[in-house]
Image (spheres, rainbow, N blue to C red):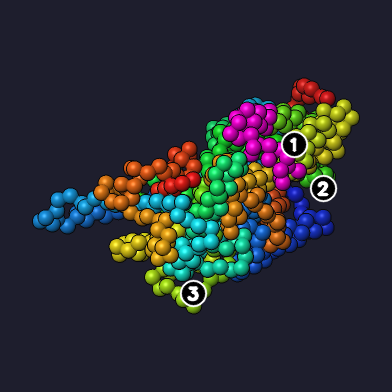
Amino acid sequence: MLNDYSAIEGRSPGFIKLLFGLGFLVLLGAGAFVYVEHYGHAVTGMNNQIVWGLPHIFAISLLVMASGALNMGSMSTVFAVNQFEQFGRFSAFLAIALLIGGLTVLMLDLGRPDNMLLPMVYMNFTSMFTWNVFLYTGFMTLCLLYLWTMFEYKQYKKLVGTAAFGWRLVLTTGTGSIFGVIQGREVFGSAITAPTFVAVSLTSGTALGILLLVHTFRQTNREMDERLIFGMRNALMFFLMLVAYLLIVEKFTRLYDPASQAVQMWILTGSWAWLYWIGVWGMGVIIPLALLFNHTLGNRVSGVLLASGCVVIGAFCFVAHTLLAGQSYPFDMFPGFKVESSFQDGVVGSYTPTLPELFLGLGGVGISGLIYLLGIRFFRMLPKKGVVPPGWDLPWSP
Amino acid sequence: MTMDRRSVLGLGGAIAAGVALAPGLHLIAAPAAPATPTDDATEAPPVPRWALLIDTTRCTTDCTACTSACRTENNVQLFGDPERDIHWIRKVELRDMNLRHPPVSLPVLCNHCEHPPCVHVCPTAASFIRKDGVVLVDKHRCIGCRYCMIACPYKARSLVFHKTKPPKDNNPAVPIRAAGVVEKCTFCVHRVDNGEQPACVAACAKADKNAMLFGDINDPKSEISQRLLKEKTQTIRPDLGLKPHVHYKGI
């Protein structure tokens, strides 16, 4: 078994370039953090209506993908889909890498990052953020233990892997509930927000896993049986249909209620409608499903990669739309009245992200990328060869 | 000393477990000192519950006495950046979309809710509610996460986006807040605790409008209690169940 896995050599020019590229992103992020810290959040595009902007979109996207990245591990450990067992280490490690990147951005975008440890000292258990402190640290602990059992104590793998799977469901429910529990803003406050976040984590985590696995295997000249990728494709298609189902049910239920028709019509036609239709539905659901259901493209690795790329962008758009549309819609404090004030009451909020925000977000991506790259360089995370178990074949293909 | 990779992973797991669990652990604390007994200790005096009644029929569009007084009293600065300026209290103009009612002008401020969502969501309990119902922000404990701004349905909170310095007419009774924290109306606790009226209410009376009435609704004899009993008033978004304590008449 020891010989089934190996670390990558890490001597190729491609590896060095990637290392420096990701390092550069981290430096950009660090520079942006210092800049915002020095001048205050006034240098961002955020304002008193849109208080969470691009850094939060990057951070929450990374956190959602982190829990989804555990999919391959969970599928084999919990649901006995044995062909993915060889990617268990990769899966758990990627989850940790993404989580650290996302959390770093979240912390560095605080108004007072110097106070970032206070949530550990003063806890308010009615806050979803406080719950998330435990959910994130607990998830990281379980992923590390899961990784450890996969390396050394295989007899506990099932136990720890199952705990990690349960935890990741609660974790993403917690992330979605940050918005789901908010009743004061018209767009938030839905019990279905958290399950939709879970579904989006399933799609985006699987898609990112496919992208990274295929590219890492190609760059390191490792062989992989293509049927493994197509197995992941089938899972991805199922998850995509789950996302579509939840999005439709949410809209249907909301549109049925006369009190929320105005806000729902604004979502479908208002200033962020392009993000909803092109990003959430187009990139996140329709295009990838069309690609994967296509007989020609769906049966090519390149087609699956293209669809996976769309899914990752779609997940980013889903988080962006949840945040931006949710905050932009004006507070409906006086139903039936047209409202005006010097504080932009009654006006759809405007938000144009600035470069420091983009750099801070990219810094988080750089951190996750660096951790992943160094992880596969120094630890035996990846199988030398991606093989299917004897007697297994694809149950279905488009 | 060298460590093999398994040990490194194991150590990493142990450290992460420590980080996860440490916040939940508390050192064993010394037992709390017993309260000092006093001979005449009977019952605590009744705690007031501060509330505000705004009569919109007396409030006019051209008057900004309340907002100006608030800025001066609480050192709330304007930065010439309308989307990022700080507003503890603002004037809002309402126009009935069916044109059945004349336009209404009214001030909107923190509603000092009985069930404040900002306090519920604050991860560090920097936002808190006093026994007398005043909702405050501890600026030293606020980490600037802005979750309270997401949760408040009254847009009553502002982040300090710009670097601040004491204004020329600085009121030393209210320390200025540093960039990166969230701030809001305090019902002028520093005045109320000294038996005075909030600055906006005093300014409204001084401008001869008398549209704002501040008082203790736990005292059935107070003017505000009497008027809330007799007059038709309403709160903003009562459907949310937050029990706001800023009441409006004439909307």
Question: At 21% across and 52% down in the image, what residue appears?
Answer: B45
Query: Amino acid type of disc 1?
Result: Trp
Q: Is residue B236 left or right of residue A374?
A: left
> Closer to the camera, A331 or A25?
A331
Residue B70 drawn at (x, y percent): 46, 64
For the question of whether residue B183 can be seen, the reply is: no
Q: How many labels does the image show?
A: 3
Instruction: Give the residue at mark 2.
Output: A219
Q: Nearer the viewer, mark 3 or mark 1?
A: 3
Name the quadrant containing residue B180: bottom right
Question: At 65% across and 61% down in the image, what residue appears?
Answer: A44
Task: Please check whether the numbered discs 2 and 3 fall on a single chain.
Answer: no
**Among numbered discs 1 and 2, the one appearing first in the sequence:** 2
Where is the N terminus of chain B found, in terms of image quarters?
A: bottom right
Residue reaching furthest bottom? Answer: B168
Determine which of the numbered discs, if any, sits on residue A281 in the image. Answer: 1
At mark 2, the secondary structure is helix
- Which span is picked out in magenta? A245-274
Give yes or no for residue A265 being in the magenta stretch.
yes
Give yes or no for residue A370 being in the magenta stretch.
no
Residue reaching furthest left? Answer: B39
At mark 3, the secondary structure is loop
- Magenta span: predominant SS is helix
Residue A358 drawn at (x, y percent): 70, 57
Query: Amino acid type of disc 3?
Result: Pro
Chain letter of the residue beneath label 3 in the structure image: B
Query: Amino acid type of disc 2?
Result: Gln
Q: State how far apart marks 1 and 2 are (Cα).
A: 32 Å
Instruction: Give the residue at mark 3.
Output: B166
Q: Which of marks 1 and 2 is in front?
A: 1
